[in-house]
Image (cartoon, grey):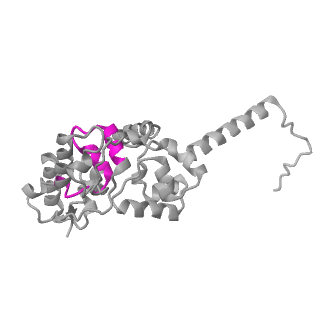
Amino acid sequence: MFVDFYSEEKVNIDTPKVIAFHHQIDSLRKINLENKRLKIFPFNPNYITDYKGAQLGMSLVEIDKLLAFRKTGKFINSRKEFQKVTTISDALLNSISPYFKFPNWVVERNQNMQLSTSRDTRLFAKKSKYILTSTDINLAVKEDLKTINGIGEKLSERIIKYRSKLQGFSTLNQLYEVWGLDTEVVGKLLLVFKVINLPNIKKINVNTVSFRELLKNPYLDYELCKKIFEYKDEVAELQDISELKNIIGFPLDLYDRIVLYLVAE
């Protein structure tokens, strides 16, 4: 049996109910689109992964440039440095940089550097006829360091002592770790000294190292050494040094500095 439901009667689609229904559909569509959009939370751009970079709109080439830079043990500490390393466009930089979150000491350093660079840089060094023996922070002697306003006998000795503990500065950012050296003085040091030659750091095998030897790592304390040894007991042997990141409570912001002294073999 065939039933013909066709009707020539025209349906009025401009009634208040139909219009309200369409408005409701449009609203639901907008909500759905908003939910599909990437929600960006504050993040440290130094730890962008392939997946995260793609989500942010970076190309594979731009992501690879960032990863290659990070493998050198260096850190990006400003939006300007991020663009210089990755070569992303101004538009993309303006879109994602508001979410960059650097450690507090980096933020304070950048603020102090902005204040410092606006002054006459000739005021940063003491008026002296002394000629620097080297502008390499790893070769500078006490007298070189003392040419910087704010650095005297004790601080110069402390910098060299800490340099010895680190087996040499791998990055100038490590100067901020010297006890008693404030950010303004470090800013002055950065205008004169550079890391020209990376130090030759003797790495130790995390799989065979003793607890006492591991504790000599300048970035590890007793509790963290204990966690590393407990993790080794669980996995028997680390296949790759990056496995340290699997340890609960491991300070990821210090990972690149900790592994300057470690290798998994």
- Magenta region: 165-190
**Residue at the outermost right position:** 8
Q: Is residue 253 visible?
A: no
**Residue at the outermost front position:** 129
The residue located at (28%, 61%) in the rendering is 242
Measured along the vertical axis of the image, is residue 119 above or below residue 219? above
Q: Main secondary structure of the magenta part?
A: helix
Left or right: residue 34 compared with residue 212: right
Is residue 43 rendered magenta in the image? no
Q: Position of residue 237 (x, y in %)?
A: 17, 66
Left or right: residue 53 compared with residue 31: left
Q: How many marks?
A: 0
Is residue 175 rendered magenta in the image? yes
Q: Is residue 122 visible?
A: yes
Measured along the vertical axis of the image, is residue 68 above or below residue 246? below
The residue located at (27%, 57%) in the rendering is 133
The quarter of the picture where the C terminus appears is bottom left
Q: Position of residue 228 (x, y in %)?
A: 17, 55
**Residue at the outermost top position:** 16
Q: Position of residue 226 (x, y in %)?
A: 13, 51
